[in-house]
Amino acid sequence: MSNFDNTMDPDTRIKSVESGKYKRFSKKSVKRFKQLINFDSNPPACFNCNFYSQDHVAMSNSLYKHHKGRCKLFSFICQSTSVCDFWQSKLGETLDNEINKTQPN
């Protein structure tokens, strides 16, 4: 059974196996599909930015206080899945370098 319609190229189809009411894809077909669409398993986002401070719980005056994730560079609260123009990886890569890798010359 194909997840896509039959007009697609056979190489781009993903085979699935019916399992109850949910469809499961084989690991081999998922891996092939990710290669076809150039899937990035570690995209630029706040959670892997050098300036991101993660959510944490701290005790203050015998009370637990939840601190949301924030950008240490500009001191504002942000979600871990967001990204800004000043993103920098733990290894020092910047967003400009990431964009230049993916764009053809």
Image (cartoon, rainbow, N blue to C red):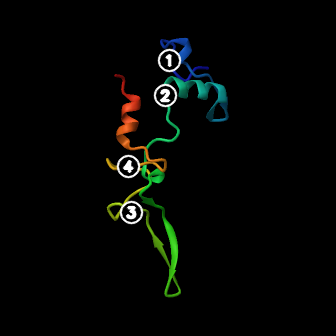
Per the model, the C-alpha gap separating discs 1 and 2 is: 21 Å
Per the model, the C-alpha gap separating discs 1 and 3 is: 48 Å
Q: Is residue 26 visible?
A: no
Give the mark toward the camera: 1 or 2: 2
Quadrant location of the N terminus? top right
Residue at image point 38% right, 49% down: 87
Tag 4 near tag 1, CB within 8 Å = no
For residue 43, above or below residue 33: below
Sort mark 4 into few (<14), some (14-19) or many (20+) by Cα contacts within 10 Å. many
Q: Which mark is residue 87?
A: 4
Q: Disc 2 marks which amino acid?
A: Asn
Percent coordinates x, y for residue 99 in the rendering: 37, 35
Percent coordinates x, y for residue 33 in the rendering: 55, 25
Give the number of callouts.
4
Tag 4 near tag 3, CB within 8 Å = no
Q: Disc 1 marks which amino acid?
A: Asp
The residue tagged 2 is 38
The residue tagged 3 is 72
Residue at image point 48% right, 62% down: 54
Q: Decide which of tag 4 and tag 3 comes sooner along the chain.
A: 3
Tag 2 near tag 4, CB within 8 Å = no
Per the model, the C-alpha gap separating discs 2 and 4 is: 21 Å
Residue at image point 39% right, 50% down: 82
| SS label for mark 2 | loop
Sort mark 2 into few (<14), some (14-19) or many (20+) by Cα contacts within 10 Å. few
